[in-house]
Image (cartoon, coloured by chain):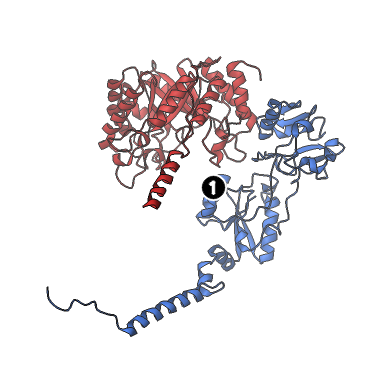
Chain colours: A blue, B red
Amino acid sequence: MSGDMRPTTCPWWRRWWVWASALLLVALLGLLLLPGSPAVRLLRQDTTWHAMTQRGVWRIGMDPSFPPFETLADDGAIVGYDVDLARAMAAQWDMEVELVAIGFDSLIDALIAGKVDSVISALPLDPRLTKDIAYSAPYFEAGLRLAVPQASALAATDPAALEPDAFDPGTLLAGRTVAVEWGSTGDMIGRRLTREGASLTLAQYPTPQRKPWARCCGARPMHSGGQRYPARPKARRSQSWLWARRWKAVPTSSPCRCVPMNCTATSPTRSLPYRRTARLTN
Amino acid sequence: MLALLLVVAVGLVLWWTRPRTPTAELGPQRTVVTQNPKAGVHTRLTDEVEPWKIKRTLEMVREMGAPWVVEYFPWAYIQPKPDVWKWKHSDEVIAHANRQGLTVIARLGYVPEWARPPETTPLFLDEEHFADFGRFAAEFVTHYAGQVDYVIIWNEPNLALEWGYAAVDPVKYTAMLKVVYPMIKAANPDVQVLAGALAPTLAPPGSEWGMNDLDFLQAMYDAGAADYFDILAVHAYGWSFPPDEPAAPDVVNFRRTELLRDIMVRNGDGAKAVMITEGGWNDHPRWTRAVRPGQRIAYTLRAYEIARDEWPWLDAIALWAFRYPWDAKTYQDYYTFVRTDFEPKPIYEELRQALTGESP
């Protein structure tokens, strides 16, 4: 081996140049990533919103077979709570609404495929889908509830006794008859209470429509649906099993009183902040 | 050096005291008390990792009065490499099922990576690997000799989805039976081989998604399948129709089973039995093919009655699905009899009363 074996040294100006370049790069990146910077705006661009504003029309997918949220009127028009909600939001945004009737099973696919801008269809939250779609804050909290006559002593139950920690349905319903839809979640919970020793009588009806809603409470129907209009056709039961989650007496205009709360939807304006919430869920 | 020793010691302690999956005692030998010896369910224990949940599931099936269970044993799980066999989970399932007095019908399928081309799904199997599948099936029936007497070869091969998105081909499926069936019989002649397990579908001719199950079965016979299975497996979904809705070629309903049976008879195969290895009704609130919960109960009770009283050629009816290991968060959750937390749905209670004759 021959030649000079000493390590070569980097000229001072080259070292300074590397350091200066690195600092400049960091500074540039910092500027670009500042909130509100063009780069951030580009990264955060809501393509759905952009398309909606360009078009001036908000295309909404919904399955019109789920009253009172969405159903078909006699003239074939889609009507319901979700329709009213969509129109109210669109009016704030100064947009037209285009309702697209899609089967419930295909709503998410239609959204992902860009066939619609949003889905408003009493759509339950599935956390696993949040990587593909953006959900709004909840605007309706379904859940099991107990409908009782206005004059029932149950309607006057101290709200504190209905809090989850204090709630004791076995005691509350002891000696009473509770109507449920046969096979429903309400039926399941009634059976559970019976297994656990509650002395209630379950009156099982083949459909919600067969329950004694009109008389409301020859028996005291444990209504397992999340809707406000229990006598409406095709009323379906809730998927929630947290039936005792948020009990609270809420007066309604019906001869019945719903216990717990959530007979009415929460205010849409409260649950629809910012335009990202154009895609909705309950 | 001391610090190194300390780290090693702590590591050893942590390893020694690591949480382990507790095993579940098999318990005493039980028998199923039932008034319907054909009644069964399709369990979903494939991905159920906790032994006590496996045991509890099978206990509840026994307590419901159903002597039959269909369970899926994926090839890829048991033989992940050509020379690697992993029997632990399936051993657990079979041991608990046997101890509960249940008869297991084992569904085999799901191809390991080593037995299929790259970029194919685990439901794709080419001719080159039929013998590998046959070797797996033969090993399975040998391993469980005396414990599993029924195996189903593949699932719903008339759907592109279940056929690895290759063109649905009854001739190819029959060719697979011709390879696999003799290997199973050579390994364990006592085992009954079920074939078919066709999805009920009205897919039009030439559909890329699937083939009408009636056409598929006839094509299987045309290809010479009769000598290569012992029992026809049938999927009998009712969709929104009641179980007494008459069968018709253009309708998917529970009695479509009778049309498949007619095809067997027409092909001189009437001496063979039929087993329903999937089927039933769904009570999702919004799925288009669902019924109301009460209808689901009534229809299911009636279906078990039909199986027992009207179809002498049917040996078992295992409806989909007893319980899932976790919520699917789709309409599928509304096929189950028991929730993932083991809370019995009303349909379970009603079936238990009907099948065991016990009052609530």
The answer to whether any part of residue A179 appears in the image is yes
Quick one: which residue is furthest to the right in this view?
Answer: A151
- Comparing B144 with B262, the one in front is B144
- Using the rendered view, name the quadrant where residue B117 is placed: top left
**Mark 1 — on which chain does it sit?**
A
Residue at image x 27%, y 33%? B132
Instruction: List x then y, in percent, for residue A277.
Output: 62, 59
Quick one: which residue is furthest to the bottom in this view?
Answer: A13
Instruction: List x then y, in percent, for residue B300.
Output: 57, 25
Residue at image x 40%, y 23%? B232
Residue at image x 53%, y 32%? B323
Q: Amino acid at mark 1?
A: Ser
Residue A211 located left or right of residue B6: right
Q: Which residue is mark 1?
A: A106
- Comparing A60 with A7, the one in front is A7
Residue A166 located left or right of residue A275: right
- Using the rendered view, name the quadrant where residue A170 is placed: top right
Instruction: List x then y, in percent, for residue A235.
Output: 69, 40
Quick one: which residue is furthest to the left in this view?
Answer: A1
Residue A171 located left or right of residue A122: right
Q: Is residue B3 above or below residue B211?
A: below
Locate the C terminus of chain B and report the quarter of the image it occupies.
top right
Residue A193 located left or right of residue B216: right
Instruction: List x then y, in percent, for residue A166.
Output: 75, 39
